[in-house]
Image (cartoon, rainbow, N blue to C red):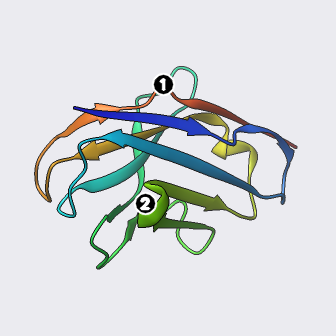
């Protein structure tokens, strides 16, 4: 079982930055894939970024490429999402999720953290 707790959300003006954190506890393995997703009001949840605990390639949605960066601190069991040049359309609840391995579904989810970008 894995528990995920997000933090770092808030209200920011367009062009600003925020860093989200996702603290993982319980059983974690290097094969785990950690992802960030978001859901805006009235819209479906969408993929934002992902990485593996063991390192390797990172992947981003086209809408956030070159603005967002996913990273991890294995010693702290924490995954981060650095969000720069924020836009009003980035407003959403952001969720951290974990999959046991690449290609598997995301089985564990955090409770979400609200990000609001004002214009």
The residue beneath circle 1 is: 111
**Residue 7 in the image: x percent, y percent?**
63, 38
Q: Which residue is mark 2?
A: 61
Placement of the C terminus among the 4 image quadrants: top right
Quarter location, residue 2:
top left
Residue in front for this viewpoint, 33 or 1: 1
> What x and y, as percent, mark residue 38?
49, 38
Q: Secondary structure at mark 1?
A: loop
Q: Position of residue 28 (x, y in %)?
A: 25, 49
Residue 70 vs residue 59: left or right?
Answer: right
Outermost residue to the bottom: 56
Locate residue 62, reporting x and y percent: 46, 64
Quarter of the picture holding the N terminus:
top left
The relative height of residue 117 versus residue 30 in the rendered view (above or below) is: above
Residue at the image position 11 percent from the left and 55 percent from the top: 103
Whichever of callouts 2 and 1 sits on the residue coming sooner in the sequence is 2
For discs 2 and 1, the disc positioned in front in the rendered view: 1
For image coordinates 52% across by 20% down, the residue present is 42
Element class at badge 2: loop
Q: CA distance from mark 2 to mark 1?
A: 21 Å
């Amino acid at each position: 079982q894995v528990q995920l707790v997000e933090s770092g959300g808030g209200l920011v003006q367009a062009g600003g930055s925020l860093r989200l954190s996702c603290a993982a506890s319980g059983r974690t393995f290097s094969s785990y894939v950690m992802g960030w997703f978001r859901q805006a009001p009235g819209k479906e949840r969408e993929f934002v970024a992902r990485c593996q605990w063991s390192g390797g390639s990172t992947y981003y949605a086209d809408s956030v490429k070159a603005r967002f960066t996913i990273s991890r601190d294995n010693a702290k069991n924490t995954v981060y999402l650095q969000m720069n040049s924020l836009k009003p359309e980035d407003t959403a609840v952001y969720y951290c999720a974990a999959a046991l391995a690449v290609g598997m579904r995301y089985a564990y989810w955090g409770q979400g953290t609200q990000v609001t970008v004002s214009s």
